[in-house]
Image (cartoon, grey):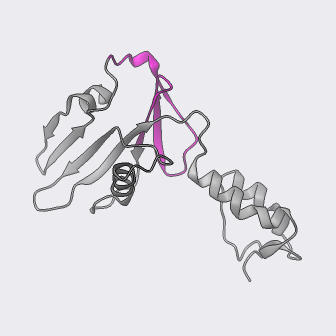
Amino acid sequence: MLWELIASGASLRTDAGELRFRGEQIAPGIDPGSIRPLGREQSNSSLVRGDAELLKWFRMVEDVRSPELEMTEALHGAGFTAVPAPLGVVEYQRPGAEAVLLALVQPYLHNGTEGWCAGAHLAARPLRAGRGAGRGRQGGGDAPRRVSRGRPSSPRRHGWER
């Protein structure tokens, strides 16, 4: 039903504002059996539809224009292809306020890497190679394992800070 609302461009009024759905590029023919949870997120909930589209539902929202949507729209509009184009959005609009992004639909990248994992991998590289922040420090050797499992903790606790 959510994909159908996005594809149709529906609007739903609430007591305090309006839910707006946009998705001119959403593929038609929505089969609920083709939707599955992704299950690898840190701060969002994501669904994949037919291995073609990824719907990212934001758990934490702010009452400002979303930099993620603003950046992806601008990059895509400028012809930059290394970022998935926005296919659809769900926004909440209150009178006199910025639209708040609740969900974003993008192409599902089968071989894509989730941003947190990519950043954690890059951050851990100097530690694995015996260079950088973890060199000669107690606990530095377990940084790649700890970060790659998605459980960041205090750098001070593990002796990672300089």
On the picture, is 66 further left or further right than 150?
A: left
Relative vertical location of residue 87 with respect to residue 128 in this rendering, above or below: above
The verdict on residue 156 being magenta is no
What residue is shown at x 66% (from left), y 71% (from top)?
154
What residue is shown at x 30% (from left), y 42% (from top)?
89
Quadrant occupied by the C terminus: bottom right
Q: How many marks?
A: 0
Quadrant occupied by the N terminus: top left
**Which one is in front, 82 or 70?**
82
**Quadrant of the rendered structure where residue 2 is?**
top left
What residue is shown at x 64% (from left), y 53% (from top)?
118
Please, which residue is most extreme toward the bottom here? 162
**Quadrant of the rendered structure where residue 127 is?**
bottom right
On the picture, is 103 further left or further right than 22?
A: right
Please, which residue is most extreme toward the front here? 79
Give how far across and how far down residue 85 sits, in percent: 40, 43
**Which one is in front, 38 or 81?**
81
Give how far across and how far down residue 36 sits, in percent: 49, 26
Give how far across and how far down residue 101 sits, in percent: 30, 51
Give how far across and how far down residue 74 sits, in percent: 34, 55
Extent of the magenta region:
29-56
The verdict on residue 46 being magenta is yes
What residue is shown at x 24% (from left), y 38% (from top)?
22
